[in-house]
Image: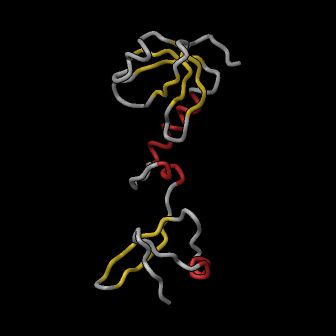
Amino acid sequence: MERKIDWLGRITIPKEVRAQMHWNDNDYLEMTINGDTISFKKVQKDPLDLRRTTITMINDEKRKRVAQLKEMYQPGDRIKCLHLESDSFVIPEGMEGTVKCVDDLGSIFVVWDNKKELALLDIPGDSYEKVKGVKRK
């Protein structure tokens, strides 16, 4: 079987070959070069990793931390910014907001009382806390 390389350097793998190899849209293939032969092998990727262009697996510790954040900060909860290392000019210390959601990477999306929307990241240097005594709507 022969295939022509297009002007972007791509080749099309025929549908029957993809079906035989159980390759689907958005699957990842590992390419190995040995002399003048190229081999492809399907590799499994974590669904949380699809948002990254670099191949980095999220480990169990990170998954546990994301689960904790999702449990701690749920939509409608109130949150208070204690300190943001890089975005303090947008969200000043003491500003409160309402949690929209926590994504699969652990970012806490917040609509702040100054009408700005900025996600909090679970990184050293940034600190925030849940406002106690405020009930979710």
Residue 60 as seen in the image, left or right of residue 99: left
Residue 44 as seen in the image, left or right of residue 19: left
Residue drawn at x 37%, y 80% is 38
Residue drawn at x 56%, y 72% is 23
Q: Position of residue 76 (x, y in %)?
A: 64, 22
Residue drawn at x 47%, y 88% is 2
The count of marks equals 0
106 or 30: nearer the viewer: 30
Residue 17 as seen in the image, left or right of residue 58: right
Q: Position of residue 3 (x, y in %)?
A: 47, 83
Q: Is residue 37 above or below residue 122?
A: below
Q: Position of residue 100 (x, y in %)?
A: 60, 27
* Colour scheme in use: secondary structure
Q: Is residue 5 above or below residue 74?
A: below
Q: Is residue 17 above or below residue 8?
A: below
27 or 45: nearer the viewer: 27
36 or 71: nearer the viewer: 36
Quarter of the image where the C terminus is located:
top right
Q: Position of residue 34 (x, y in %)?
A: 31, 82
Residue furthest to the front:
7
Residue furthest to the left:
35
Residue drawn at x 52%, y 19% is 116
Residue furthest to the bottom:
1
Q: Is residue 100 above or below residue 106?
A: above
